[in-house]
Image: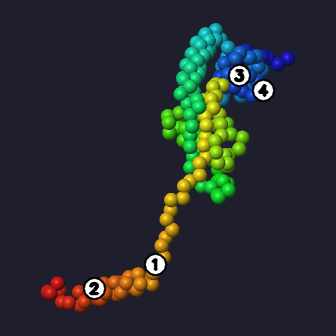
Amino acid sequence: MKKKIKVILLEDIPQVGRKYEVYEVALGYFRNYLLPKDLAAIATDEILNELKEEREKAKKAKEKRISANKDKAKEIEGNTYTFIVKAGAKGQVYGSVTAEDIIEKVSKDGYEDINVNLTHPLRNLGEEQVWIDFGDNVRVPINVILQKEESTKEKPKKETEEEKKEETENNESNKEKEEDEESKPEEEK
């Protein structure tokens, strides 16, 4: 019969248990795997008391984090973010707006550690609702608008033959002046 020992897991371990839970495992498994990797500790009264305090701290921290995330969510809920994109005449967007693009734009407003739930990149002009996830089941919708970039570029005007001739004449006369100055003795300069 295998000897078993009660341990407290210090990390989540697949197929064994969750962090800060007390489990009974084989002595060899504890001694050869869990202990050397600091994944578990023997469940003594002292450690159980520390564990209880640690759980309370973690619970308070989680409540505080959830409260802060809910406050942030209220601030951002329903906000509209506009992306200026290049698009064809029929409204087809060149490229797309991805979750990373949205996160970057929202982060500029001071909202950090967020995720954007997109099933596919945005490729159509217009408005679309996107969900922002703050973690701990705190999610809010925002509006994302893809707007066509206005073409304000002027077409480059074609140089006329006269302008080209003037430019070459100016260049030639400048070269002649430089050559004349170089050929003069140093005393005259």
Outermost residue, right direction? 1
Asked if the residue at tag 2 contacts the one at tag 3, i.e. Cβ–Cβ closer than 8 Å, the answer is no
Question: What is the x, y in percent for residue 67?
Answer: 56, 20
Q: Distance between the residues labelled 1 and 3?
A: 75 Å
List the residue tagged with mark 2.
Answer: 178
Q: Distance between the residues labelled 3 and 2?
A: 84 Å
Badge 2: how crowded within 10 Å, few (<14), some, or many (20+)?
A: few
Q: How far apart are marks 2 and 4 (CA)?
A: 85 Å
List the residue tagged with mark 3.
Answer: 18
Q: Say which of marks 2 and 4 sits in front.
A: 2
Badge 4: how crowded within 10 Å, few (<14), some, or many (20+)?
A: few
Question: What is the x, y in percent for residue 6?
Answer: 73, 15
Q: How many numbered dots are placed on residues in this image?
A: 4
Kind of element beneath mark 2: helix
Q: How far apart are marks 4 and 3 (CA)?
A: 9 Å
List the residue tagged with mark 4.
Answer: 15
Kind of element beneath mark 4: loop
Kindly identify the amino acid type of the residue bearing the numbered disc 1. Answer: Glu
Q: Which mark is residue 159?
A: 1
- In the image, 13 versus 146, the foreground residue is 146
Q: Considering only order in the chain, which callout, 4 or 2, is on the residue closer to the N terminus?
A: 4
Q: Considering only order in the chain, which callout, 2 or 1, is on the residue closer to the N terminus?
A: 1
Q: Considering only order in the chain, which callout, 4 or 1, is on the residue closer to the N terminus?
A: 4
Q: Is residue 9 above or below residue 182?
A: above
Badge 3: how crowded within 10 Å, few (<14), some, or many (20+)?
A: some
Residue at 23% from the left image edge and 86% from the top image edge: 181
